[in-house]
C-alpha cells in the first residue's frame, strides 16, 4: 500500500510541477512580449493540452481510486449499470478498440477539451490570459481529482463548466438546462449545476 501511495504522490507532483513551469513561462512571456503582436502562448497551450490528455489518459490502472473500475466496466461492457450517455460512449469507443487504456484517453480528451473551451470563454469574458487561467484550473485539486479518479464526474463537470462559461451571462437558461440534463446522462451529480 505504501508503495502505491508514494507512486501516486509522485505522479501528482510530476504533473503539477510541469504545469507550474508552463504557468511561470506564460508569465515571463507576458512580461517580455507585452506589446508585441505575435503570441507565443499557443505552443504552450498545445503542450499543456497534449500533456494533460496523455498524462491522465495514458495512466496505468493503479493510478486513481476508480481507474480499475472503469477498466472493468469497459471490458465487461454489456453487464454494466451506469448512466446511459457514459455507457454509449463506452460502446462507441469499443467499436474501435477493446483496450480500456484508449477509452481513458478518449474521456481525458473530452474532459480537457471542455475545460479548455470553458477557460477560453472565461478568459475572454474577464480579459485575462488564457494559458494562466487554464493551467491554474488544471492544477487545482478538483481537476486532479476529476482527471485522476472521478472520470465520469470529471467529464460531466467539465461539460457544465463549459456550458456556464458560454451561456450564464447571457441568461440562456434553457440552453444551460438542456446541456446540464445531457451532462446528467454521464453523471447524476451534474444536477447541482441547476440547483446552484
Image (spheres, rainbow, N blue to C red):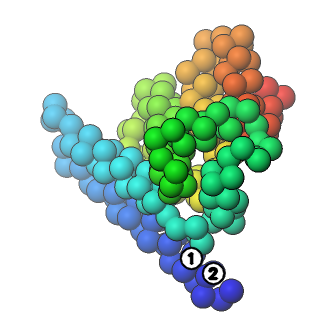
**Residue 62 percent location from the top left of the image:** 60, 72
Which of the image's four quarters has the N terminus?
bottom right
Q: Nearer the viewer, residue 72 or 183?
A: 72
Q: Which residue is mark 1?
A: 9
Side of 180 relative to 27 (left or right): right
Residue at the image point whose x is 51% and y is 78% from the top: 10
Q: Identify whether 90 is placed above or below 138.
A: above
Residue at the image point whose x is 41% and y is 55% from the top: 54
Q: Residues within 10 Å of mark 2 (few under 14, many from 20)?
A: few
Q: Identify whether 183 is placed above or below 138.
A: above
Residue at the image point whose x is 68% and y is 38% from the top: 87
Q: Residues within 10 Å of mark 1 (few under 14, many from 20)?
A: few
Cβ atoms under marks 1 and 2 closer than 8 Å: yes
Side of 14 relative to 180 (left or right): left
Q: Which residue is mark 2?
A: 5
Instruction: Look at the numbered disc 2 and give the secondary structure of its residue.
Output: helix
Residue at the image point whose x is 76% and y is 47% from the top: 80
Q: Is residue 155 visible?
A: yes
Q: Nearer the viewer, residue 174 or 38?
A: 174
Q: Is residue 146 visible?
A: no
Q: Nearer the viewer, residue 156 or 87?
A: 87
Alpha-carbon span between mark 1 and mark 2: 6 Å
Please give the label number shown on residue 189. none
The quarter of the picture where residue 68 lies is bottom right
- Name the residue furthest bottom: 2
**Residue 21 percent location from the top left of the image:** 35, 63
The quarter of the picture where residue 6 lies is bottom right
Instruction: Look at the numbered disc 1 and give the secondary structure of its residue.
Output: helix
- Name the residue furthest right: 195
Amino acid at each position: 500500500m505504501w508503495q502505491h501511495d508514494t507512486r501516486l504522490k509522485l505522479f501528482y507532483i510530476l504533473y503539477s510541477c510541469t504545469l507550474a513551469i508552463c504557468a511561470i513561462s506564460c508569465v515571463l512571456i507576458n512580461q517580455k512580449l507585452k506589446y508585441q503582436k505575435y503570441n507565443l502562448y499557443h505552443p504552450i497551450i498545445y503542450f499543456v493540452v497534449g500533456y494533460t490528455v496523455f498524462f491522465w489518459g495514458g495512466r496505468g490502472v493503479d493510478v486513481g481510486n476508480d481507474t480499475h473500475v472503469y477498466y472493468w466496466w469497459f471490458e465487461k461492457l454489456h453487464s454494466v449499470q451506469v448512466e446511459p450517455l457514459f455507457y454509449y460512449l463506452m460502446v462507441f469507443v469499443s467499436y474501435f478498440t477493446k483496450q480500456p487504456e484508449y477509452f481513458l484517453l478518449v474521456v481525458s480528451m473530452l474532459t480537457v477539451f471542455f475545460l479548455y473551451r470553458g477557460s477560453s470563454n472565461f478568459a475572454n469574458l474577464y480579459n485575462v490570459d488564457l494559458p494562466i487561467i487554464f493551467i491554474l484550473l488544471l492544477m487545482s485539486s478538483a481537476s486532479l481529482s476529476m482527471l485522476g479518479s472521478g472520470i465520469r464526474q470529471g467529464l460531466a463537470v467539465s461539460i457544465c463548466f463549459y456550458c456556464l462559461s458560454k451561456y450564464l451571462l447571457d441568461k440562456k437558461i434553457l440552453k444551460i438546462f438542456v446541456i446540464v440534463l445531457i451532462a446528467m446522462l454521464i453523471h447524476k451529480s451534474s444536477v447541482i449545476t441547476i440547483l446552484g
